[in-house]
Amino acid sequence: MLSKLRNDVRELFFPRICPVCEGRLLPDESFICSECLIEFPLLKFEKTDDNQMIRTLWGNIPVAHAVSIFAYRHHSIYHNLLLQIKYRGNARLAQQLGTWAATQIRDLELEEKADVIVPVPLSRRKQWKRGYNQAYHLALGLSKIYQLPVQQWLASKVDRQTQTHMNAQQRIENTQGCYEAKIPESEHGKRILLVDDVMTTGATIIACTNAILEVDKTAEISVFTLALSK
Ligand SMILES: [Zn+2]
């Protein structure tokens, strides 16, 4: 009774907002409203070892498994989720999305296919400016379901040039050598699940994978991103 009253008061002064449509959440809605959940543009991959995402990466790097949760378009309201976790520092939402995403793809048993979760790092400039890496918080959210450790084994070495006007191949070349991996020798040979918020051309994932394989050739890489850019 008391806790209900406390919740009602909190709701009155700090209404919870759906991060997709920005409408008010009902008390029984957890963090995205029911309507936005119903309309969610889920990708629903049936396999992790052969799908449109992994095919984009195969030509460049060896990847064992790859999965993404939803298709992302700039004009869609679901883009708001990425803006919230990327630019507005909403760490809590990033973790909620990680946990929610892992439950959405429970039947793909990703936890059986990896030993450790490694977030893609921000560039040094962005880390300094924002002080917060959304991929790390997504990784923490995933780890709650998968019960796998999160290790920040990757770091940004140099800042890449702005890629807005580059094609896919130019982006891949521009990103190479931007990351370095530091993996303790005792951890070599692990199955690593690389985590990022969005995959567009795959340039970042490719550069991170190469950085890992440079240090540990025996590592097996799989990839999780919250969204695939269309
Ligand atoms: Zn909504």
Image (cartoon, rainbow, N blue to C red):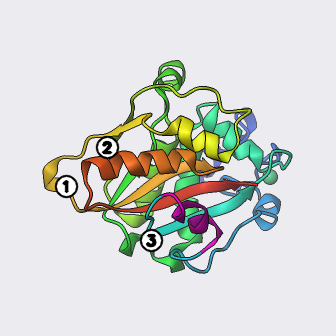
Which residue is the site of mark 3?
110
CB under 8 Å between callouts 1 and 2?
yes
Question: Could you say which is closer to the camera, residue 30 or residue 158?
Answer: 158
Q: Amino acid at mark 3?
A: Leu
| Range of magenta residues | 51-60
Q: Please state if 25 lies on the left or on the right of 30 as rendered.
A: right
Q: Quadrant of residue 51?
A: bottom right
User: Would you say residue 121 is visible in this rendering?
Assistant: yes
Q: Position of residue 215 (x, y in %)?
A: 26, 47
Which of the two labelled residues, at mark 1 and mark 2, occupies the earlier sequence position? 2
Which residue is the site of mark 2?
153
Q: Any atom of ligand 1 within 8 Å of the CB at mark 3?
A: no
Q: Amino acid at mark 1?
A: Glu
Question: SS at mark 2?
Answer: loop
Q: Quadrant of residue 101?
A: bottom right
Distance (Cα) linking label 1 and label 3: 19 Å
CB under 8 Å between callouts 2 and 3?
no
Residue 187 tag number: 1
Q: Please state if 177 lies on the left or on the right of 46 as rendered.
A: left
Q: Position of residue 18 (x, y in %)?
A: 75, 47
Question: Could you say which is closer to the camera, residue 181 or residue 17?
Answer: 181
Q: Residue furthest right?
A: 75
Judge the density around disc 3: few (<14), some (14-19), many (≥20) Cα neighbours within 10 Å. many
Image height check: is 46 above or below 31? below
Q: Amino acid at mark 2?
A: Trp
Question: Could you say which is closer to the camera, residue 14 or residue 62?
Answer: 62
